[in-house]
Image (cartoon, coloured by chain):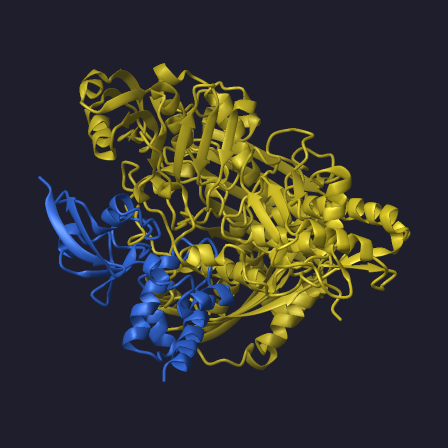
Chain colours: A blue, B yellow
C-alpha cells in the first residue's frame, strides 16, 4: 500500500507515492533519478548517502521516504547554482580533495551543514563533522584543507 | 621557464566537477528500460557436498525471469592465472566457504529476486571444515581441492647466493616472526554491474572494475562467447585497491542472466557480499632471520611465508611470489632465501590489495632492521643508509633499480621529522620510528602468458584542430589516471590541458591491462606519449610541406607553433582557417600559428589525424622459476617517519605525526601524487591499528560491515608531511614512475617501530589494538 508524500527536494516541491518501507536514498536515486546520493552500505556506517534534511546532515539510508514528508531535502544536485560550483565544491576540486569521488557528495554535504552552523570551524571541528563520512582514498587531509579553504571563501563573499 | 608547460603542476583533475556535483555516473547509477535485477544465492555452510538443487519453487514465483545454476552455466574452470584455474561460476559438487556462489536469479525487481533466492532449496552433506592456515597444513586436515593435496595451493622455494655461507660469515643473526590479519579493501562503492546481451550475440558489460581487459577475457571464457563479442565498459569507479582487478561472479552472472532473458540485468553487491567476495589482503605469517656484520653490513636474509589463501586462488600465486621477491631491496644483500606456502582454507578467497604481497613481509623486515640496529648500537637510519641501494644497483634476486631515490627519501624524512632531535630523546609513552620500502611500476608480465602489448592508446584530433581526444582502455578508479594521460598528451602535443579530452575504461577503445600493480602512469603513459608524438610529427610534416620550413625546425608549445623558435610566415594557413570558420566566435589570433590551425591543415591534407602508441616492457628479470614476479621497468620507493603517543595505562595509541617521502620519478601531477601518498598511509594505519576480518567457529564473517570492520576516520588520521622526491626514471615517460602502492610499504613498520620506541615492547601481531598493546606491556612488566 503506497503512501503519498510531499516534500521539498533541492528547492522544488515533489509529490510522490511510495512504499512505506522505501528508504529516502532509494526514493532519491530510483524515483527521482538523483543518483548523486550514493549507496555505500545501507547501515548508516559509511556516510556516502548523506543529504541535508531541514538543515541537518542525515544518512538517507536510515530515513524512510515517508519520514521525509513535509521536510526540506538538499542533495548534491541542488548545490551548484546557475551552472556555477558552490564554494565547497570548488574547493574540493581545487584542493585535490576528490579521488574516486564516491564519498564526495556526502562529504560535501556534511561540510555544508557544518559551515552553515559554524562558519569558522577549527581543524578538529571539521574532522569531527566529517567523521561519519568514510573515505578510503585520500587519508582526509586534502578534504580538511578544502573545507578550510571553502570556509575562507564563503566568509569572503558575505558582507 | 620550467622544462614543462603542463607536467609537474597541480592541475585540477579532469573529473573533479562531475564528481563534486553528483553528475559522475557509477555502475549502480545506470538504468535501462526493461532492466531486470539479479541476486545471488550463497552457500550458508563453509564446506559441504551439494546433493541436490531444487529451483522449481523459485521459478514459479511471479516476476522471476531466469535462474542460473551450474546446470545452466556449465562447468568452465577459471581463475586469475591460468596456472591455477580452480573456480567455477557456480559450485557444482562442493561448496568451500560461507558465501560460495550456488545460483543467481533475475527478476523484475530486487525484492523479488531476493525472495526467489530464498526459495531455492539446496541439500548439502556438510563436511568438516578448516579455517586456520596452520591447521590446514596438518595431516588429516579437511581437504578443499582434490587436485591440491595438503591444501597446498602453491609453494615457492628460492635461493639467491649462498645463504648458509653468508650467515656463517655474519657476526650477528637476529630472528623475528610476524602475523598480520586478513583485510578488506573497504572501497566505499560496492561492486555493481549492468549487462546487456544484444540480439546479435554481443555482450556489453558496464562494471565497477579496475581491469576491463581481464574482465572481458574471463567473462568471454566462462560464458563461452567469442572474446571479440564482449565489450567491458568501466563507468566511474568508487575505489578498487586490488579486489576489483578480477572478474567477479556478479559480472559473469549478470552476463549469463542477460543472455538467458534477453533483457539488461543489473546486479550490485551488498556491503556484506563485498566482504564475502573478498579478494583482499591475505593473512601472512612471516618468519625471518637477518645476518649482519658488526659494522651493520647486511649479509643474508632468510624469509619464510605462510599465506591463508581462503578457498580459491584469485591472484594468490602472484601474492606468494611477491612476499619473497619484494624483499630483495632496497638494501644490498649477499644472499637471500625464500620459502613461501599459500594454503587453502574454508574462507573467502584472498587476492591482491595495495602493496600486493609485500606489505606484511616488509613490516616484518623493517622491524627486524630496527631490532638489529638496536643490538649493534646503531641509529636505525644509519643502519639503513649503510646498506642502501642506489640507481643502477640490481637486487640479489635480479630486480634492476634503474632509478632509486631511496637515500634522498631517507634524508628527506630524517630532516622533515627532525629525527635527530627526537630519536632516543623522547619521554616514555612517546616514540618515533621509521621504515623504507619499494614497489613495482607495473608488473613486468601480464597475469596470463602473452606477448600482448600492455597498453595501446589512440589519440584523435577533432576536425577543427582544437581538441585532442585520448582513447584508452586504461582504468580511472580515483587515482587520477585520466588526468595523468591528458597531461602527458597535452605536454607532448604542446597544447593546453583544457584542449585534451580523455575517453577511457572501454575495451573497444584500446588494449590496456588496467589499474593494478601501479602500472598506468608508466605504461599507459608511454603509449600516450608515443601516440601524441606521432600526431605531432604528422602535423609538422604537413606544415613543412606547406610552408617550406624544415620539419626539425618546427616545435609546439602552449598551443603555439614555432619555426626555429620564431613565429614564421604562416599567413596563408591563417587566412584559410578564418575563411573556413567565418562567423565563429573564436578565430585564431596572435603572432604565432596556433596548434589548432596547424592540425586543421593536416586534416585537410589527410583526413582525421590519428596517432597510435603502444608499450610493453622489454624482457625483464632472471631465469629462475618465478623470476617474472617482482620484475618491473622501474621501482618507486618510500621512506616514512611516524611519531606516536601511547597511553601507558591503557595501551591506547595516537599517531601524532607522519612524514613521508616518495620517489615517483617525475611527479606528473603533484596534487595527485600527494593524494596517493596520503591515501596509502591511511590504509596502512588502518591495517596496523584496527583492521581485521573476523570469523566465527563455523566460518561466518563476524564483522562484514563498515561499522564493525573499522577503517580510519578523519579523527584517526593525522596530517602527513608529504615530500615528493623526483629521481627521473630512465624507463618512464618523462621520467615518471609509480606512487600508488610503494607509499604503503613503510607505514606499518614505521608505526610499529615508533610503538617500540615509546613502550619498549615489540609487537609482532596486527592489529595493534589497545588491548593487544596493553597485554603486551603487562607481560613485559611481569617478566621484568
Q: Quadrant location of the N terminus of chain A?
A: top left
Residue A127 appearing in the image = yes
Placement of the C terminus of chain A among the 4 image quadrants: bottom left
* In this rendering, position of residue A140 left or right of residue B303: left
Along the horizontal axis of the image, is B398 left or right of B85? right
Q: Quick one: B288 or B100, which is closer to the camera?
A: B100
Residue at image coords 66%, 53%: B582
Looking at the picture, how far across and down is residue B231, in whole percent?
A: 51, 30
x, y percent for residue B178: 48, 52
The total number of labels drawn is 0
| Vertical placement of residue B35 versus B16, above or below | above
- Residue furthest toward the left? A1
Above or below residue B428? Residue B639 is above
The residue located at (38%, 63%) in the rendering is A80
Say if B203 sits above or below B484 in the image. Answer: above
In the image, B388: left or right of B721? right
Residue sitting nearer the eye, B514 or B406: B514
> Which residue is at the front of the view, B178 or B462?
B462
Q: Tell me which corner region of the image, top left, top right, bottom left or bottom right, holds residue B283.
A: top left
Tell me if B658 is positioned left or right of B188 in this view. Answer: right
- The percent position of residue B200, horizontal first and vertical second, equals 47, 19
Kindly tell me whether residue B377 is visible in this rendering: no
Can you give x and y, in whole percent of width and height, for residue B526 in the image?
70, 46
B553 or B328, which lies in front? B553
Quarter of the image holding residue B384? Answer: bottom right
Amino acid at each position: 500500500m503506497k503512501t503519498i508524500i510531499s516534500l521539498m527536494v533541492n528547492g522544488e516541491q515533489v509529490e510522490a507515492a511510495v512504499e512505506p518501507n522505501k528508504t529516502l536514498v532509494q526514493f532519491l536515486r530510483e524515483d527521482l533519478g538523483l543518483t548523486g546520493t550514493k549507496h555505500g552500505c545501507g547501515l548508516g556506517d559509511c556516510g556516502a548517502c548523506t543529504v541535508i534534511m531541514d538543515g541537518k546532515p542525515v544518512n538517507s539510508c536510515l530515513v524512510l521516504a515517508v519520514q521525509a514528508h513535509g521536510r526540506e531535502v538538499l542533495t548534491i544536485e541542488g548545490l551548484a547554482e546557475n551552472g556555477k560550483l558552490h564554494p565547497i565544491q570548488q574547493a574540493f576540486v581545487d584542493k585535490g580533495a576528490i579521488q574516486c569521488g564516491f564519498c564526495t557528495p556526502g562529504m560535501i554535504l556534511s561540510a555544508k551543514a557544518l559551515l552553515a552552523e559554524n562558519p569558522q570551524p577549527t581543524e578538529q571541528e571539521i574532522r569531527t563533522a566529517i567523521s561519519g563520512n568514510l573515505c578510503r582514498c585520500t587519508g582526509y587531509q586534502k578534504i580538511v584543507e578544502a573545507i578550510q579553504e571553502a570556509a575562507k571563501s564563503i566568509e569572503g563573499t558575505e558582507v | 621557464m620550467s622544462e614543462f608547460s603542463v607536467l609537474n603542476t597541480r592541475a585540477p583533475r579532469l573529473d573533479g566537477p562531475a564528481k563534486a556535483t553528483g553528475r559522475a555516473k557509477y555502475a549502480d547509477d545506470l538504468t535501462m528500460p526493461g532492466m531486470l535485477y539479479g541476486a545471488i544465492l550463497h552457500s550458508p555452510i563453509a564446506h559441504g557436498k551439494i546433493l541436490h538443487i531444487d529451483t522449481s519453487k523459485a521459478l514459479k514465483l511471479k516476476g522471476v525471469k531466469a535462474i542460473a545454476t551450474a546446470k545452466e552455466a556449465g562447468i568452465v574452470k577459471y581463475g586469475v592465472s591460468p596456472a591455477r584455474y580452480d573456480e567455477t561460476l557456480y559450485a557444482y559438487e562442493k561448496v568451500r566457504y560461507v558465501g560460495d556462489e550456488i545460483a543467481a536469479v533475475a527478476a523484475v525487481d530486487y525484492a523479488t529476486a531476493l525472495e526467489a533466492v530464498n526459495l531455492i532449496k539446496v541439500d548439502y552433506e556438510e563436511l568438516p571444515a578448516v579455517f586456520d592456515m596452520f591447521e590446514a597444513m596438518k595431516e588429516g586436515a579437511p581437504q578443499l581441492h582434490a587436485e591440491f593435496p595438503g591444501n597446498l595451493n602453491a609453494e615457492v622455494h628460492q635461493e639467491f647466493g649462498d645463504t648458509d655461507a653468508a650467515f656463517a660469515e655474519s657476526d650477528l643473526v637476529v630472528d623475528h616472526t610476524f602475523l598480520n590479519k586478513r583485510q578488506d579493501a573497504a572501497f566505499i562503492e560496492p561492486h555493481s554491474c549492468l549487462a546487456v546481451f544484444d540480439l546479435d550475440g554481443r555482450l556489453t558489460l558496464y562494471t565497477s572494475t579496475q581491469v576491463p581487459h581481464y574482465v572481458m577475457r574471463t567473462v568471454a571464457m566462462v560464458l563461452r562467447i567469442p572474446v571479440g563479442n564482449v565489450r567491458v565498459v568501466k563507468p566511474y569507479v568508487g575505489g578498487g585497491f586490488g579486489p576489483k582487478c578480477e572478474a567477479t561472479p556478479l559480472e559473469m552472472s549478470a552476463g549469463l542472466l542477460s543472455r538467458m532473458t534477453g533483457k539488461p540485468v543489473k546486479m550490485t553487491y551488498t556491503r556484506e557480499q563485498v566482504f564475502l567476495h573478498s579478494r583482499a589482503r591475505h593473512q601472512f605469517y612471516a618468519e625471518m632471520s637477518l645476518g649482519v656484520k658488526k659494522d651493520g653490513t647486511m649479509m643474508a636474509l632468510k624469509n619464510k611465508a605462510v599465506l591463508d589463501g581462503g578457498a580459491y586462488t584469485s591472484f594468490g600465486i602472484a601474492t606468494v611470489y611477491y612476499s619473497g621477491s619484494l624483499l630483495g631491496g632496497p638494501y644490498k644483500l649477499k644472499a637471500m632465501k625464500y620459502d613461501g606456502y599459500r594454503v587453502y582454507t574454508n574462507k573467502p578467497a584472498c587476492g591482491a590489495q595495495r602493496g600486493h604481497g609485500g606489505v606484511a613481509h616488509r613490516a616484518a623486515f623493517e622491524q627486524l632492521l630496527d631490532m638489529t640496529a638496536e643490538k649493534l648500537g646503531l641509529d636505525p637510519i644509519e643502519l639503513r643508509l649503510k646498506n642502501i641501494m642506489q640507481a643502477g644497483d640490481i637486487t640479489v634476486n635480479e630486480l634492476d633499480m634503474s632509478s632509486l631515490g631511496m637515500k634522498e627519501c631517507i634524508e628527506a624524512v630524517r630532516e622533515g621529522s627532525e629525527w635527530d632531535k627526537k630519536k632516543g630523546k623522547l619521554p616514555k609513552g612517546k616514540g618515533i620510528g621509521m621504515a623504507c620500502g619499494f614497489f613495482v611500476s607495473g608488473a613486468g608480465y601480464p597475469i596470463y602468458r602473452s606477448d600482448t602489448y600492455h597498453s595501446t592508446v589512440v589519440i584523435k584530433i577533432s576536425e577543427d584542430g582544437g581538441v585532442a581526444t585520448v582513447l584508452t582502455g586504461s582504468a580511472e578508479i580515483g587515482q587520477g589516471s585520466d588526468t595523468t594521460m591528458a597531461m602527458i598528451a597535452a605536454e607532448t602535443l604542446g597544447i593546453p590541458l583544457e584542449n585534451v579530452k580523455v575517453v577511457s575504461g572501454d575495451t573497444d577503445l584500446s588494449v590496456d591491462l588496467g589499474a593494478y600493480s601501479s602500472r598506468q602512469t608508466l605504461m599507459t603513459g608511454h603509449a600516450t606519449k608515443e601516440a601524441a608524438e606521432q600526431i605531432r610529427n604528422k602535423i609538422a610534416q604537413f606544415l613543412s610541406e606547406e610552408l617550406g620550413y624544415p620539419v626539425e625546425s618546427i616545435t609546439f608549445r602552449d598551443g603555439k607553433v614555432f619555426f626555429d623558435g620564431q613565429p614564421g610566415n604562416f599567413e596563408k594557413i591563417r587566412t584559410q582557417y578564418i575563411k573556413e570558420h567565418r562567423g565563429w566566435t573564436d578565430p585564431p589570433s596572435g603572432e604565432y600559428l596556433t596548434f589548432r590551425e596547424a592540425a586543421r591543415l593536416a586534416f585537410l591534407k589527410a583526413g582525421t589525424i590519428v596517432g597510435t602508441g603502444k608499450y610493453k616492457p622489454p624482457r625483464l628479470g632472471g631465469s629462475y622459476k618465478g623470476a617474472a614476479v617482482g620484475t618491473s621497468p622501474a621501482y618507486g620507493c618510500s621512506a616514512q617517519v611516524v611519531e606516536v603517543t601511547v597511553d601507558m595505562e591503557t595501551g591506547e595509541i595516537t599517531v601524532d605525526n607522519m612524514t613521508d617521502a616518495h620517489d615517483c620519478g617525475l611527479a606528473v601531477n603533484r596534487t595527485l601524487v600527494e593524494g596517493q601518498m596520503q591515501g596509502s598511509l591511511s590504509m596502512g594505519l588502518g591495517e596496523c591499528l584496527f583492521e581485521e576480518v573476523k570469523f566465527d567457529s563455523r566460518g561466518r564473517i563476524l564483522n562484514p560491515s563498515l561499522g564493525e570492520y573499522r577503517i580510519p576516520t578523519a579523527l584517526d588520521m593525522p596530517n602527513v608531511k608529504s615530500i615528493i622526491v623526483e629521481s627521473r626514471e630512465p624507463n618512464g615517460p618523462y621520467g615518471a614512475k609509480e606512487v600508488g602502492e610503494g607509499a604503503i610499504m613503510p607505514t606499518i613498520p614505521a608505526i610499529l617501530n615508533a610503538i617500540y620506541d615509546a613502550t619498549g615492547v615489540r609487537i609482532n601481531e596486527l592489529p595493534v589494538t589497545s588491548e593487544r598493546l596493553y597485554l603486551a606491556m603487562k607481560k613485559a612488566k611481569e617478566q621484568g
